[in-house]
Every structure is written in C-alpha cells, then in structure tokens.
Image (tube, helix red, strand yellow):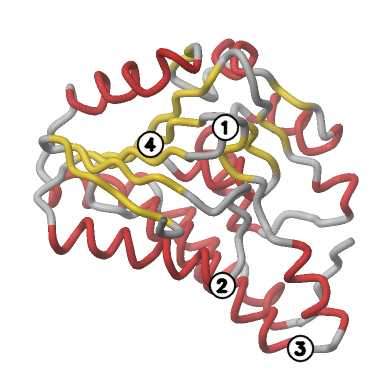
Amino acid sequence: MAVIDYIVDGHVAVVTLNSGENHFNPSFLQSFLSVLDEVESQTDATTLVVTSSHEKIFSNGIDLAWLVPVIQKGDVQGAKAFFYMLNRLFKRIVTYPLVTVAAISGHAFAGGAILCCAFDFRFMRSDRGFFCFPEVDLGIPFMPGMNALLKKAIPMYKLEEMEYTGNRLTAAVCEQHHIITQACSMQDLMPQTLSFAKSVNKKRAVVQEMKLRLNKDIVHAIDIEDLPYIESGKFNIG
C-alpha cells in the first residue's frame, strides 16, 4: 500500500493517507506533495477530498520521533529543510486550484489539526476522535504561518482557548463553533463528505484565483514571516 494514494470518482479526487498515524516527516510530506501534483496535472478533478485509512487517527502531526533526534544531533539544515517542506504543503493546499475537503476520520492533533485548517471545508467523525493543539504542553510555539492558517478556520475566541489550554474538542463542539462543516458518524462520514464534494464542481482557474486573494495573508506569513523562525535554527521542541 502506498504511503498516500488516490482514486477519482467523477469530478472528485479522493486522497487517502495510509501511513499509520500519518506523522509528518520528509517522506510523508514529499508523498503528499507528489500526489497533489499528480491529481492536478493528470486528472480533471475539481474537488479534492482527503481522509485517512487509520481506524481512529486522521493525523497526529509532526513526527517527533524523527525530528527530535535530527535537532539533538545538530542537523540544523535537515530541520530547516523539513519545516520549509511542511510550509510548502500548507501553502500548496491553501492555494490549490480545487475545492478541498478534509474528512477527519479520527484524532487530528497538533500539526494534523493545523493541516485540517488548510482545507476549505471540514467534515469530522462524531463518535471517535478529538481536534487538539497540545503544543502548549510540548513547548512548541506556533510559527506565524501556522497561526494564520488556524485563524482561517477557527474563531479567535476559540483559537485562544485551544492554544493556551490544549483542550481537546469533540466533533460536536467543533461543529458548534463552525470549525467544521458537519459532524458525522463514522458510517456516514464519507457518504456525507462525498455528497457535499460532488455538489461542488467549479472551474479550477476561478477557484485558485479566489484562494490567492482570500488567503494572501496566509501565504505572506508562510513565505515571509516564518523565515526568521526557520533560519534562526533555534527549534524549541520537547
């Protein structure tokens, strides 16, 4: 099974993350970027759905088991390259020429929750899984680009609570605060997500131009404001 694969159903490309907890490391990020490139260049899809094959996890974010040793052994360039690649993925999704939908099939923690915020729409499993930013307890402050992404999807009053407390939100709470479009049982998650995705069939060029205008502050934060944090090489993790 590929780390990430996809199928095309009409005008909807359905991407499935198959790497266990779908932790972010160089191989996972490169696979994700490659699949996004392939969907754009080799299909006529106009809507993108991303989900996970794990029975209870969408993504648990950065692969600290990989990254912490890289930092501890002083491989600053390796750490920098990782964060630049992570930013490439976030930027790719917020400027992607297809309407994007996350089908959150389980826990979305830390970077996994940030990833979900990059999508245009979010559906989430209601019977299992939390949406959470535990970085306050891990000692990992968000970079400006990450915060810009979070503000795209989460009301400021709720974002402050989540960042400062690390509280775990259920799908029902996420729906109440408009972080997700709909909470669904696991049985209904993909049918409801696909029903929505199939109802949206818009021209790529228009969608991308809208995203470039709507998300220009996010792109600026990723391209410009994150630079000093990454180039400093001072990664406060763990």
Query: First in sequence: mark 4 or mark 1?
Result: 1
Label 4: few (<14), some or many (≥20) within 10 Å? many
Instruction: Please name whichever residue, 87 or 161, is drawn nearer the observer in this view of the structure.
Output: 87
Query: First in sequence: mark 3 or mark 4?
Result: 3
Label 3: few (<14), some or many (≥20) within 10 Å? few
Q: Position of residue 236 (x, y in %)?
A: 86, 67
Q: Quadrant of the N terminus?
A: bottom left
Amino acid under disc 2: Pro
Looking at this view, name the residue that lies furthest to the front: 1
The numbered disc on residue 55 is: 1
Q: Position of residue 112 (x, y in %)?
A: 60, 45
Query: First in sequence: mark 1 or mark 3?
Result: 1
Pointer 3 with pointer 4, Cβ within 8 A: no
Q: CA distance from mark 2 to mark 4?
A: 24 Å
Q: CA distance from mark 2 to mark 3?
A: 14 Å
Query: First in sequence: mark 2 or mark 3?
Result: 2
Residue hosting label 2: 26
Element assignment for label 4: loop
The reply, left or right, for residue 21 in relation to residue 17 is right
Residue at (36, 23) in percent of width and height:
190
Element assignment for label 2: helix
Residue at (59, 81) in percent of width and height:
81
Residue hosting label 4: 120
The reply, left or right, for residue 143 in relation to residue 196 is right
Q: CA distance from mark 3 to mark 4?
A: 35 Å
The answer to whether residue 159 is above or below residue 192 is below
Q: Position of residue 17 (x, y in %)?
A: 46, 48
The numbered disc on residue 75 is: 3
Amino acid under disc 1: Glu
Element assignment for label 3: loop
Residue at (52, 33) in percent of width and height:
153
